[in-house]
Amino acid sequence: MFTLATKNLVLRDFQPADVAAYQVFTGERKYQRFYSEEDCEPAKAEMLVHLFSDSTKVRPRSMYQMAITLKDTGELMGTVGVRLEDHRQASMGAGVARAFHGKGYAQEAGQAMLDFAFNELGVHRVYAETISKNRAAIMLCKQLGMVEEGRFVEHKFFKNQWWDTVIMATRQP
């Protein structure tokens, strides 16, 4: 099992046994604000955990979607990952349970993934796409050194409305 350790966290590969914990934080109403109804179904959470787990067996590996766990207790609190793309680029995403917001864990996990992408995987550029109203995600991206590179107007349709999306990115230091 692949792991990355930080001061407070262990980022590790997902396992099928993580389904219930993943469903808990992705099932939170506030977490679901920026996702379609289909993306918030328990069956989708189960499918994603199995996808994340199965992706660890693919060689060469192109997806590192990790479970964020507390180092002291092993409690699963979220997910962070990078997905490799062509030309030494990668996309990145993260989500943390509300009970752990405001403690710096998302930034700690995100920085560990960026460092891994740049220093171990040889990535040149990492980007994240988020709904423009997701202030927490945009703030996290800025804390990780990302800047806004683009904005797509009325780019995603769900929850009976059109949403703008923002592309944030950073390059290898």
Image (cartoon, rainbow, N blue to C red):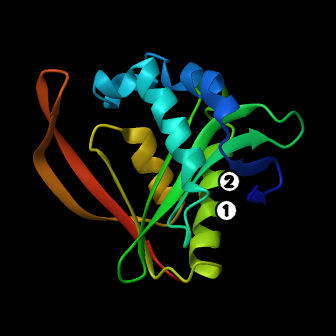
- Farthest residue toward the right? 72
Q: Is residue 133 visible?
A: yes
Question: Are the residues flagged by discs 1 and 2 in contact, CB closer than 8 Å?
Answer: yes
> Residue drawn at (65%, 43%), measured in percent from left and top?
14
> Residue drawn at (76%, 55%), measured in percent from left and top?
1
What is the x, y in percent for residue 21? 65, 24
What is the x, y in percent for residue 44? 41, 28
Quarter holding the C terminus is bottom right
Q: Is residue 160 above or below residue 104?
A: above
> What amino acid type is highlighted by mark number 2?
Glu
Q: Is residue 123 above or below residue 103?
A: below
Q: Which mark is residue 96?
A: none
What is the x, y in percent for residue 50? 54, 38
Q: Which mark is residue 112?
A: 1
> What amino acid type is highlighted by mark number 1?
Ala
Q: Is residue 37 left or right of residue 112?
A: left
What is the x, y in percent for residue 117? 57, 72
Q: CA distance from mark 1 to mark 2?
A: 6 Å
Q: Is residue 104 visible?
A: no
Residue designated by label 2: 108
| Disc 1 versus disc 2: nearer the observer | 1
Q: Is residue 165 left or right of residue 114?
A: left
Q: Quadrant of residue 118?
A: bottom right
Asked whether 50 or 164 is in front, the reply is: 50
